[in-house]
């Protein structure tokens, strides 16, 4: 049951935020000036789905571990905090059209992901490594967010 919950939590966050932001992509987002390295729109869904699955597996590895409860609780709180920030970035960027505030928010999210990786590494190295593609993609997304902010 922990495995299913761990997988469904990040997938649900991604699915719900995606549901609320999809309308902005062909309209507002399409009108923005974007840098040359902006990926095609079709790439985002499979990348995010893969990342959410890896995040869920990482969460499960931490949750099921035999580590002290206090250590696991801190790691899970950090993970939850970055997941909340992940959800709100989409709303700030796509729904509120606040590119600059989204940039501030994604930097905070990046920091929380890093803290999650550090906390997960104290419990399960594989769980920490499963978050590395996520922080890598968010690093790229931060550069993309910054570039879109500068161009618009």
Image (cartoon, rainbow, N blue to C red):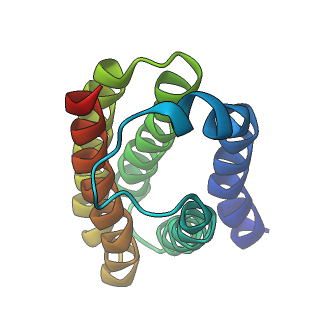
In this view, 127 is above or below 150: below
Residue displayed at 31% across by 40% down: 145
* Residue 63, quarter of picture: bottom right
Q: Is residue 88 visible?
A: no
27 or 76: nearer the eye?
Answer: 27
> Which quadrant is home to the N terminus?
bottom right
> x and y percent of residue 107 in the render?
23, 37
Q: Is residue 99 visible?
A: yes
> x and y percent of residue 125 in the render?
30, 81
Which residue of the protein is positioned furthest toward the bottom in this rendering? 126
> x and y percent of residue 98 in the render?
41, 17
Residue displayed at 22% across by 48% down: 143
132 or 68: nearer the eye?
Answer: 132
In this view, 140 is above or below 60: above
> x and y percent of residue 134 in the render?
38, 64
In this view, 32 is above or below 72: above
Could you tell whether 110 is left or right of 67 in the image?
Answer: left
Could you tell whether 49 is left or right of 79 in the image?
Answer: right
> Which quadrant is home to the C terminus?
top left
């Amino acid at each position: 049951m922990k495995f299913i919950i761990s997988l469904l939590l990040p997938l649900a966050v991604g699915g719900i935020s995606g549901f609320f932001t999809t309308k902005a992509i062909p309209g507002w987002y399409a009108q923005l000036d974007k840098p040359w390295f902006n990926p095609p729109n079709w790439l985002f869904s499979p990348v995010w789905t893969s990342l959410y699955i890896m995040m869920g597996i990482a969460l499960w590895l931490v949750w099921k571990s035999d580590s002290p409860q206090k250590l696991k609780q801190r790691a899970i709180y950090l993970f939850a905090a970055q997941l909340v920030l992940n959800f709100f970035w989409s709303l700030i960027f796509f729904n509120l059209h606040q590119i600059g505030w989204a940039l501030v928010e994604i930097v905070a999210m990046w920091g929380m992901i890093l803290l999650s990786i550090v906390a997960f590494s104290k419990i399960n190295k594989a769980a920490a490594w499963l978050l590395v593609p996520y922080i890598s993609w968010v690093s790229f997304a931060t550069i993309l967010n910054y570039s879109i902010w500068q161009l618009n």
